[in-house]
């Protein structure tokens, strides 16, 4: 009887320690998850800012300006537009 | 030892003389009662704390470590049909202070803060001198700057997360997209019209925080945040840019007061472009006036002038009054109706019905109009959406003015046939022309991207009439017509000019509205482009001179952008060979 009690006591103590450890580990993991989620949010914010930046660089007035001034592009003249060969749609 | 001694002691105690005295009964009862009362008090207090006051105490306990956290949701984006951003939110911070606490800052700290948030030291002191418990130091601070502020660890300075709306397309789509106020509330345009769908709903979660402020555990259910829905407009930002830039060039060239362009896809009723001038930059609205804010194409009506002639003639064709080659005698360029006289800008002789449109004869269209009962004309105007709100869902849409036919006098019926005495918005006019572009049926317009082409709208004219009118509209763009400048290289297009006197205080003033509405390509109509230029001030004012070139540029560019096959022979160096396109 006494031995059994001692054995059960040991089991209880080890269980209690295991609970504490797993709780601790759980919280650690949870914090890591929180951190990653925060990072995901920040990346999303950054993505939004980059999207804004991209659309600012890609506005049509700017594209036209760059095309005309830096790349010296012009609308093709009539002569430069060959007609499609017969039968092509 | 003690155990052994006790019997003798207890014996001695039992024999103690004090115990021999008879105790008064009330004393023991009193002690018993007092003990009982104290015990009851304890039970009562326990009951009070555990049952009656439980919620309050539980809350107090929870508040030591539980925290409710709001999970912010962002407002939906507004994007064009290809996914280009038109309006997008990005998080910012607002820096605020509790002035009483913040006055503890040293002079150096104040200077650092003022530099970071780009305020003058004097302005900052002014804000901190406030007696209120809360003042904004600066709103819409970029996150990087806000982080620098929080690193200073200033007393009494706090931060709050908020959003800022950006409009990458800027003034180009300002009227269409509109804008929001600081608190994410739509104030104009699509931002206002679709406020409910765009708005995000913040979520919440309850967590346990440890001593260092880290979140250790989620408690209970979390309410996930709902981001606002993205709104996909029918707008094609390339076509929109084309429309806006051409309109801008024309308005500044002709020193006009205002202008508008509307581009409609006739297969779906989608609005591909809607540009107005004057406009504003929605990202910087410091100096905004009412004139800039008005979305003229939707909220302003004007007398459309000759652009209405094709409708009168289509009705005459549809009712079998005339054929496209019937002769109308327009000599001598004047027509007296009652006491009033209708006259042509240039007198014409005998014209065919098609030529009445080509040459834009007021006399011809008046004669045709008077051959029909007022009720039929009214029904036709009503059928093409005049006098009705176009139901785009836009704030401030107007119906225009179409008076009931019972009060029409003959002269009014005649002037209405060439677009005076009736008023419409540019959007209504463009929509009405889609009747000719389609097979004579009217479809609803859509501001949002449509999923599939609309099959059939409400019929107004027969398909045969629509085809005949298209052919007449094409003649307008020829060398003999009123708008050769509207011709587009590579595409067959057609349209009608309009040059209307403006009504000012009930009388026609020497100010004009020049317009051009057209269809292209004629062989398989895809687009309607409507151009309106208000009060051109450079001397010329005919629709064929002012509005038609804008139409040609926008129509040509838009058709190419959309990849529509050219249906007209290209005039090339090799002129003998016709291209094999239909």
Image (cartoon, helix red, strand yellow):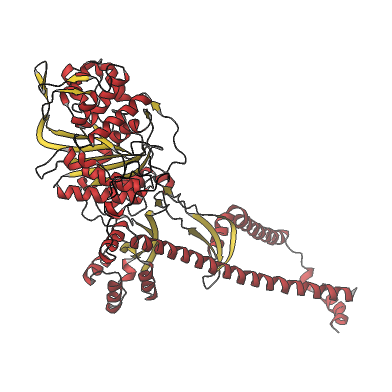
Could you tell me residue B108's position as x and y percent?
A: 28, 79
For the view shown, which residue lies furthest in the bottom direction?
A: B1
Q: Quadrant of residue B387?
A: top left
From the viewer's perspective, tell me whether residue B220 is left or right of residue B460: right
Could you tell me residue B190's position as x and y percent?
A: 35, 45
Q: Can residue B178 be seen in this view?
A: no
Q: Quadrant of residue A1?
A: bottom right
Could you tell me residue A73's position as x and y percent?
A: 28, 61
Q: In the rendered view of the protein, which quadrant contains the C terminus of chain B?
A: top left
Q: In the rendered view of the protein, which quadrant contains the N terminus of chain B?
A: bottom right
**Going 25% across and 16% down the picture, which residue do you hit?**
B372
For the view shown, which residue lies furthest in the right direction?
A: A1
Q: Nearer the viewer, residue B180 or B251?
A: B251
Q: Is residue B305 visible?
A: yes
Q: Nearer the viewer, residue B34 or B109?
A: B109
**Going 32% across and 52% down the picture, which residue do you hit?**
A81
For the view shown, which residue lies furthest in the front direction?
A: B576
Q: Is residue B357 above or below residue B188?
A: above
């Amino acid at each position: 009887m006494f031995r059994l009690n001692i054995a059960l006591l040991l089991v209880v103590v080890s269980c209690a320690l295991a609970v504490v450890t797993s709780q601790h580990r759980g919280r650690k993991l949870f914090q890591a998850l929180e951190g990653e989620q925060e990072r995901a949010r920040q990346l999303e914010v950054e993505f939004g800012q980059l999207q804004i930046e991209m659309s600012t660089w890609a506005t049509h007035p700017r594209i036209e300006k760059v095309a005309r001034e830096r790349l010296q592009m012009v609308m093709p003249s009539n002569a430069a537009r060959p007609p499609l060969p017969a039968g092509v749609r | 030892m003690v155990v052994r001694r006790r019997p003798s002691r207890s014996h001695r105690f039992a024999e103690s003389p004090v115990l021999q005295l008879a105790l008064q009964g009330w004393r023991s009862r009193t002690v018993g009662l007092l003990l009982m009362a104290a015990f009851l008090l304890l039970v009562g207090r326990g009951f009070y704390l555990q049952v009656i006051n439980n919620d309050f105490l539980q809350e107090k306990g929870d508040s030591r470590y539980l925290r409710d956290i709001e999970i912010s949701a962002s407002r939906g984006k507004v994007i064009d049909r290809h996914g280009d951003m038109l309006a997008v939110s990005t998080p910012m911070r607002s820096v605020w202070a509790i002035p009483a606490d913040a006055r503890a800052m040293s002079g150096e700290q104040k200077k650092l803060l003022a530099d970071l948030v780009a305020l003058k030291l004097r302005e900052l002191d002014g804000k901190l001198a406030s007696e209120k418990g809360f003042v904004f130091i600066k709103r819409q601070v970029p996150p990087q700057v806000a982080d620098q502020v929080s690193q200073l660890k200033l007393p009494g300075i706090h931060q709050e997360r908020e959003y800022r709306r950006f409009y990458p397309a800027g003034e180009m789509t300002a009227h269409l997209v509109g804008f929001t106020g600081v608190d994410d509330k739509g104030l104009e345009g699509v931002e206002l019209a679709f406020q409910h769908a765009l708005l995000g709903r913040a979520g919440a979660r309850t967590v346990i925080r440890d001593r260092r402020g880290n979140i250790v555990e989620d408690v209970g259910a979390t309410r996930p945040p709902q981001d606002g829905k993205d709104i996909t407009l029918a707008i094609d930002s390339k076509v929109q840019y084309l429309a806006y830039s051409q309109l801008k060039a024309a308005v500044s060239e002709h020193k006009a007061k205002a202008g508008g362009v509307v581009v409609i896809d006739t297969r779906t009723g989608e609005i591909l472009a809607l540009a107005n001038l004057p406009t504003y930059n929605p990202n910087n609205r410091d100096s905004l006036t009412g004139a800039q804010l008005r979305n003229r194409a939707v909220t302003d009506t004007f007398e459309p002038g000759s652009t209405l002639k094709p409708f009168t003639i289509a009705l005459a064709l549809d009712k079998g009054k005339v054929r496209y080659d019937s002769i109308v005698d327009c000599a001598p360029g004047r027509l007296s109706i009652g006491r009033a006289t209708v006259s042509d800008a240039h007198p014409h002789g005998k014209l065919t019905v098609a030529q009445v449109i080509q040459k834009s004869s007021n006399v011809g269209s008046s004669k045709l109009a008077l051959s029909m009962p007022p009720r039929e004309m009214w029904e036709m105007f009503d059928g093409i959406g005049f006098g009705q709100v176009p139901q785009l869902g836009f704030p401030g849409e107007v119906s225009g003015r179409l008076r009931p036919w019972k009060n029409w006098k003959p002269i009014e019926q005649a002037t209405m046939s060439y677009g005076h005495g009736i008023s419409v918005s540019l959007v209504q006019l463009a929509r009405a022309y889609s009747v000719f572009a389609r097979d004579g049926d009217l479809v609803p317009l859509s501001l949002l991207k449509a999923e599939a082409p609309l099959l059939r709208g409400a019929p107004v004219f027969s398909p045969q009439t629509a085809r005949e009118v298209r052919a007449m509209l094409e003649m307008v763009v020829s060398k003999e017509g009123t708008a050769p400048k509207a011709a587009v290289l590579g595409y067959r297009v057609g349209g009608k000019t309009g040059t209307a006197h403006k009504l000012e205080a009930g009388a026609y003033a020497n100010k004009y509205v020049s317009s051009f509405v057209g269809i292209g390509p004629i062989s398989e109509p895809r687009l309607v482009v409507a151009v309106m230029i208000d009060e051109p001030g450079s001397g010329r004012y005919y629709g064929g001179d002012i509005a038609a070139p804008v139409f040609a540029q926008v129509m040509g560019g838009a058709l190419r952008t959309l990849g529509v096959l050219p249906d007209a022979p290209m005039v090339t160096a090799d002129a003998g060979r016709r291209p094999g396109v239909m």
